[in-house]
Structures are given as structure tokens and as C-alpha cells.
Image (cartoon, rainbow, N blue to C red):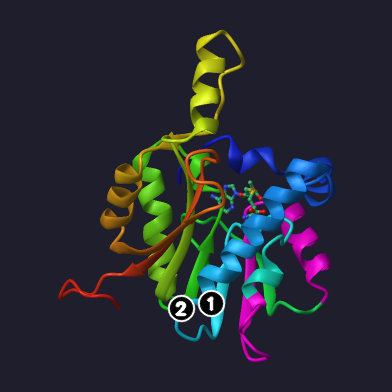
Amino acid sequence: MADYHAKHKYRGEDYAEYYATGRWDGVWGRRVDRRERRGVARLLGRLSPLASILDVPCGAGRFLEALLSGGGDGRRVFQSDIAHEMVARAREAAAGRARGQFVGDAERLPVADASVDLVCTVRLLHHVADPVVRVGILREAARVSRRFVLASYFDRFSLQALRRRVRSLLGGRPSRRVAIRRSEFLEDARRAGLRAVATWGSAPLVSEQRFVVLERVRSDGGGA
Ligand SMILES: C[S@@+](CC[C@H](N)C(=O)[O-])C[C@H]1O[C@@H](n2cnc3c(N)ncnc32)[C@H](O)[C@@H]1O
């Protein structure tokens, strides 16, 4: 399996504590967090009833409310992350509302094929520069899902991405985050056997974060 910075960055109690309590603090952070959680809830609301969801990487469990919303009492949400400290945070924050948490690598999850209706993979792909690895992560999500994958990526065609490029050109610390074109993301998805059915961005052209609902492509070319 591949090695990249984000696989290690979030390990350790200090970082988990920061991600759970400080990362989304401040006026801007709270705004982005709130918008993203609302955006995810809205995207899920457009999909046919989802009985089960796997959130990987779950981080500190930021999206649990959004993933449960609109699902009634019967929806089962599972949470997974490569960092056991994050899994512990997610478990604590869930307080029994999620069905279970486990440590897992999004490239090879310890889960059977077609186990859930949707896999949610938010804020991971922009940490992965190698398209082969990105495709591997999407393909694994498609394997575990019966139908949908909700993924996010950083869009190169945005002010935020441009600002980071300019900053590093001017000698600033090079960013490890990878912003790609929408066409590259769609090609990654296609190679993973997925096609886009809905897209959402909290502030298109300004914010680089894009959320895309993908659907497994059947062998006859239609949706699952
Ligand atoms: C930016 S956080 C996003 C967490 C969550 N989706 C959110 O938006 O709050 C990235 C997470 O990815 C996890 N991670 C990195 N590589 C991973 C991998 N290969 N498999 C599973 N989790 C991974 C990190 O441990 C970290 O918790």
C-alpha cells in the first residue's frame, strides 16, 4: 500500500485533540465546517433511501450528524480511519449513535464487498498526489459500496488553489495538498468504475473543496 504524509500526520493524541477541538475553530473554520456538514446532509437527502453508510476517513467524526440526518432510526453509520487516535475520538463523540468504529486503511478496508449503500470519503483525496493511489482509494470505496460513493477533492480551478500556487512560487512553504482539475477527478472516478451524479461546492470558484456523489457503473454502462 502507498505511503503519503496524511497517513501519519493525524496520528498521536495531540493532533487528534487539535482536529477534534481546534481545527474547525474560529469564525472561518466554524463557517466552513457548518457549510460542509450541511452540504453533505443535503447531498444525501437527494439519494434514494440509504440504510447504511461507511465514513472513511472519519477523522474525529465531524460528519456523523450529517450522515445520520434524514435516515430515520434505521440508518446504520460505521466510522473508520487509519489513525486509532481519530477512531477513539470518533467513538467518544458518537456516544453510541454510530453502529461501530474500526481502524482501517481506505486503500484496503477490512470489509466485505457491497457491505453498505454509501461510502463517504471526505478530505482524503487532496492529500494524495499519485493518481494511481487516488484511483485505488475510489475503487476500494466502490467495492465496499452497493451503490454510492460521496467523495471530495480539491479543485485546481479556484481562488484558494491559485493562492497556494502563488504562495509557493513566491518562496513560501510548498503545500502537500493537491488540487486537480475536475476532468482529472472524473477520470480517476471512471477508472474506479464510478460516474458522477451530483456535485456541490460550498463556494465554487473561491473554495477548492468539491463534493461529488458518484455511482457505481454497471457492466452494461448504466448506474448500479
Ligand atoms: C483531513 S482529515 C479528514 C477527516 C474527516 N473526513 C473530516 O473531514 O473531518 C484526514 C483523515 O484521513 C485519515 N487518513 C489518511 N490516510 C488514510 C488512509 N489511507 N485510510 C484511512 N484514513 C486515512 C487521517 O488519519 C485523517 O483522520
Magenta stretch: includes residue 92: yes
Give the magenta-colored segment's residue range: 68-95
Quadrant of residue 190 within the rendered picture: bottom left
Given the image, on which type of amino acid does mark 1 rest? Gly
Q: Element under label 2?
A: loop
Given the image, on which type of amino acid does mark 2 rest? Leu
Position of 214 compared to 168: left or right?
left
Which residue is tagged 1?
A: 45
Residue under the image location 48 percent in, 73 percent down: 118
Q: Is residue 4 visible?
A: yes
Q: Is residue 8 above or below residue 118?
A: above
Quadrant of residue 74 within the rendered picture: bottom right
Q: Is residue 12 visible?
A: no
Position of 49 compared to 185: left or right?
right
Which residue is tagged 2?
A: 47
Find residue 82 and report its horizontal and vertical position in percent: 62, 53
Could you classify mark 1 by the number of other residues whose Cα lies within 10 Å: few (under 14), some (14-19), or many (20 or more)?
some
Q: Closest to the observer: 141 or 215? A: 215
Q: Which mark is residue 80?
A: none
Find residue 89 and report its horizontal and vertical position in percent: 79, 59
Q: Is residue 192 above or below residue 41?
A: above
Q: Closest to the observer: 150 or 46? A: 46
Q: Is residue 196 above or below residue 72?
A: above
| Label 1 with label 2: CB-CB less than 8 Å | yes
